[in-house]
Amino acid sequence: MPSQAFQSLTEALAEIPELSGIGTLLARADRAQALRRLRVIGRGQVVLLSSHFERYIYAVNEEAVAALNVGAIASVRVPGQIKLLHSSQPVDDLALTQWNNRSDSLVRFAETDGWLWQDTGVGIINHERLLAWMKAPHAKSLVRFYKLWNIDDIFSSVTRTKINRTRLYYGIQQLVDKRNSIAHGDYNAQATRLDVLRYVKSVKDFSSRADRVLARAVGRIQGGPPPW
């Protein structure tokens, strides 16, 4: 069974072809006006699709952390990269605080992160800290995120051949790049119907496969079956 995050993504993706249907109706106007409208719809589809995909990454991270937090997790089972990232912001904040003002911050750090650095520690992970660094789900950012969960290269984990890996990697990257161009006011950034179909396929293929890979990784960390 897929994660709740993936089920929500699947439902949300139904909006994308709905916009294509609207575009077909609008295309009955004069040619120049129809092309302008189709162009706007294509741009909107890119922004919407990228937003749904980004939301999936945040949601599946939250779901994975929740699975670890059930009953609290032992520090010895938490991957090293998660420990470091979880503690990085509090430590950085401490470094910017004058010594005579660090007492309260040190107490808070001991409460929220101290357990991570004790062999017998048990505690709760804050899912928001694991993705605070991510600005958009670029392909390289996805590789970094899944490495937190002891998945060395997510694109290699979800594909068997180099050609499929390259297709998936650049399909995701092109979607996010185009979305960012549109969001930053690039009027020339546009997507044809075929572009949108290709981006949707990349998102579906990646998410459905990565969902299973992450579930197995969380299960290994817990020392039990996959949580979904």
Image (cartoon, helix red, strand yellow):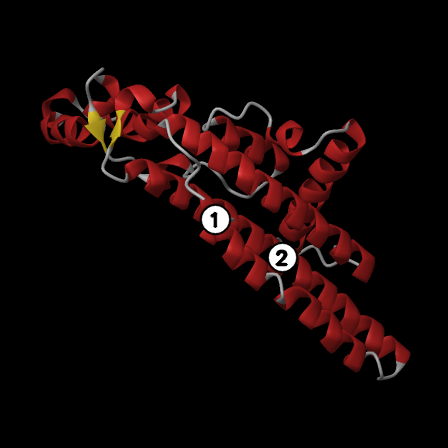
In this rendering, the answer to whether 1 lies above or below 22 is above
Q: Secondary structure at mark 2?
A: helix
User: In the image, residue 45 lies at what x, y percent?
Assistant: 67, 62
Q: Which residue does the numbered mark 2 point to in the structure image? A: 49
Q: Identity of the amino acid at label 1?
A: Ser
Q: Residue furthest bottom?
A: 29
Q: Could you tell me which quadrant the C terminus lies in? A: top left
> Is residue 190 something that shows in the picture?
no
Please report the residue visible at 42 percent of the width from the left and 33 percent of the height from the top: 218
Dot 1, crowdedness within 10 Å: few (<14), some or many (≥20)?
many
Q: Nearer the viewer, residue 51 or 92?
A: 51
User: In the image, residue 3 lies at what x, y percent?
Assistant: 48, 48
Q: Which residue does the numbered mark 1 point to in the structure image? A: 3
Q: Which of label 1 and label 2 is nearer to you?
A: 1
In this rendering, the answer to whether 163 lies above or below 48 is above
Contact (Cβ within 8 Å) of mark 1 with mark 2: no
Q: Identity of the amino acid at label 2?
A: Leu
Q: Nearer the viewer, residue 223 or 74?
A: 223
Quarter location, residue 80: top left
User: In the image, residue 79 lies at what x, y percent?
Assistant: 39, 23
In this rendering, the answer to whether 44 lies above or below 123 is below
In this rendering, the answer to whether 63 lies above or below 141 is below
User: In the image, residue 12 lies at what x, y percent?
Assistant: 56, 62
User: Cα distance, mark 1 to mark 2?
Assistant: 19 Å
Q: Residue furthest right?
A: 31
